Amino acid sequence: MKQTILLVILSLGCGVSMGEMTKKQIKSFKKLVKIDGSNYSFEERRDEKHCILTIEFSAEEYGLEKVIVRCAVELTDKKTKQTYLVTKKRVHGSLDRGNYNQYIGEGYWTVLMPFGEFKRLKVTGYAFEYGIMDGGKFVPFEAEYDDVDTYEELVNRTPTAYPNKCSLNRVRRVYSY
């Protein structure tokens, strides 16, 4: 009988510790990073045309080790009207290498999408989210959306993966003398 009660108590305790994040915990992550704006452009890089989505951010130097950035971009081929989906995900991370004593608390992410064989592409929607994993679930706490309400909505409406290799890169701004 004592063993059964002990097992029940332990089971209930594990359920609480593995439960959803509290609003207070999510609010503490919101204080660490803020999206300041976004834009996209079309540029030639290495003799190839690219679509580049840029997300500006302000962030603390530390405390972002578990923060994940995920992005979904919908591209439409203007000629065929076919839509394609680019998805990328990375850990934001804290400052952990190099000489960052001149970090000014801001930077930007870029999603580089080469045209490849496509001649005319346009961005028809994107979702960019900062979040944390809670068990197996991604919980966003800061986001920027264009022509979509959620990341999941964009992923569900655009089933065809973009065929070209894309990248997600972060740049932190530092003081220069």
Image (tube, grey):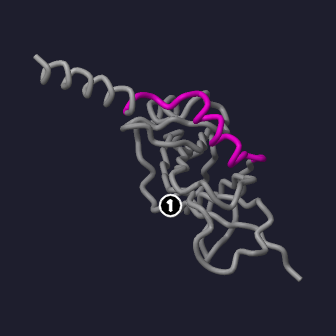
Q: Which residue lies most toward the bottom here? A: 177
Looking at the picture, which amino acid does disc 1 mark? Cys
Residue 150 in the image: state x and y as whole percent: 56, 30
Up-down: is 47 above or below 105?
below
In the shown orientation, is residue 42 left or right of residue 23? right
| Nearer to us in this view, 113 or 137 | 137
Residue 175 in the image: state x and y as whole percent: 84, 74
In the shown orientation, is residue 93 left or right of residue 108? left
Residue 8 in the image: state x and y as whole percent: 22, 20
Quadrant placement of the C terminus: bottom right
The magenta stretch spans which residues? 18-37
Magenta residue check for 112: no
| Nearer to us in this view, 23 or 75 | 23
Up-down: is 125 above or below 93?
above
Residue visible at 18% across and 25% down?
7
The quadrant holding residue 105 is bottom right
Q: Is residue 76 visible to the viewer in this orientation of the structure?
A: no
Secondary structure type for disc 1: loop
Q: Would you name the residue on which mark 1 appears? A: 166
The quadrant holding residue 59 is bottom right
Residue 113 in the image: state x and y as whole percent: 56, 59
Up-down: is 61 above or below 87?
below
Residue visible at 49% across and 49% down?
86
Residue visible at 80% across and 65% down?
104
